[in-house]
Image (cartoon, rainbow, N blue to C red):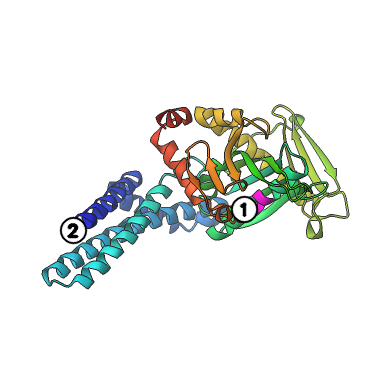
Amino acid sequence: MRAEAQNTVAEIQKSLELLKQRLNWETAEYRLEEFNARVEDPDLWNDPEAAQKLMRERQMLVDAINTCKSIETDLNDNIELIELGEMEEDDEVVKDAEAALKALAVKAAEKELEALLDGEADGNDTFLEINSGAGGTESCDWASMLARMYVRWAEKKGYKVELQSESAGEEAGIKSATYKISGPNAYGWLKSESGVHRLVRISPYDSAAKRHTSFSSVWVYPVVDDNIEIEVNPADIRIDTYRSSGAGGQHVNTTDSAVRITHHPTGIVVTSSEKSQHQNRDIAMKALKSRLYQLELDRRNADINAAHEAKGDAGWGNQIRSYVLQPYQMVKDLRTNHETSDTKGVLDGDLDGFMAATLALNASGKSRAEAQAED
């Protein structure tokens, strides 16, 4: 086997070994048997939410086991093909098997990355909140561009996207918007996007065609299910109803049905502007509980807590990523130094490279300062 193919095999074996370690491979089949036994319990669906959670956990385990077995099988099959091709001096068979190994190495690396999503709430659905910052109309337009970027990313993942609330900008774009994004590991993927995002471009709103810098902030927090008990003291909240001021169309209500909940101890404010006031109260309360749960997660993780404290105002000095469209094309993450010149692709939702770099950095145990010091 040629040296390049040997290196590819070694990469796949390393990824497979790490996948099995995270899965606790020795006990995986036994755990699946336990899940199967619980699924067959006739009383399981007496509690539909608990049953659905159990089914999700079981499916995640099934998928992880099948992934490991599939990678291992494909690896062995292609090694055998290379050996057979070399024995028979069939260069075409060898080349095809080597190409298959390269594709398998990419797949194994992706699955290894997904295995890093093992935090307490990584598997949950998520809320994504966008707020325009310093820059007026420019920042409102930038906030709408970010909203489009994340919606595109979620749709590419096959996730369900629901607009929870939206406040239009005075001249263009949006002042704020909150989305609920539902799908496997939605929070785990998106959690690294929390922070201030900076845009540099020639302003379409400036007749002099000058370059402008705009800021908008993104905050991501997990949707918590009803099995996680988050106590909210009624005396700590204020519930207001108001008429929606959305961008138009189906998001504008004709009655004061929109709901805003203010949590006095933390200053958290959540809103919902669907058609039903009762539905809005329920959505807003769940969003509040999710925010409070996120605060609790932050307290348990000093690095995440420090990042949120540093997020501050959406302006200079607090950004996590820069999107430069003029005088050159570049998107750069300031935490990982991951960058690309494909600005159009990024704004169309190609964000996996940035998320992967942050996940890998967090998994390595290095702080942002340590990573920067090494560079």
Q: Looking at this rendering, what residue extends furthest in the right direction?
A: 255
Q: Looking at this rendering, what residue extends furthest in the front direction?
A: 208
The residue mark sitting in front, 1 or 2, is 2
Image position of 164 (left or right of 15) = right
The x, y position of residue 57, in whole percent, is: 45, 51
Q: Residues within 10 Å of mark 1 (few under 14, many from 20)?
A: some
Magenta stretch: dominant secondary structure: helix
Q: Residues within 10 Å of mark 2 (few under 14, many from 20)?
A: few
The x, y position of residue 90, in whole percent, is: 17, 73
Residue 298 visible somewhere in the drawing: yes
Quadrant hosting residue 40: bottom left
Quadrant where the C terminus is found in the figure: top left
Q: Which residue is mark 2?
A: 2
Image position of 57 (left or right of 225) = left
Using the image, tell me which numbered label, if any, was put on residue 149: 1
Comes first in the chain, label 1 or label 2: 2
Q: Name which residue type carries label 2.
A: Arg
Using the image, tell me which numbered label, if any, was put on residue 273: none
The one of 158 and 37 positioned closer to us in this rendering:
158
Q: Are marks 1 and 2 in contact (CB under 8 Å)?
A: no
The one of 101 and 201 positioned closer to us in this rendering:
201
Residue at 54% over, 50% down:
186
Distance between the Cα atoms at labels 1 and 2?
42 Å
Asked which secondary structure carries label 2, the reply is loop
Asked which secondary structure carries label 1, the reply is helix
Quadrant where the N terminus is found in the figure: bottom left
Residue at 59% over, 56% down:
348
The x, y position of residue 223, in whole percent, is: 60, 45
Residue stretch in magenta: 145-151
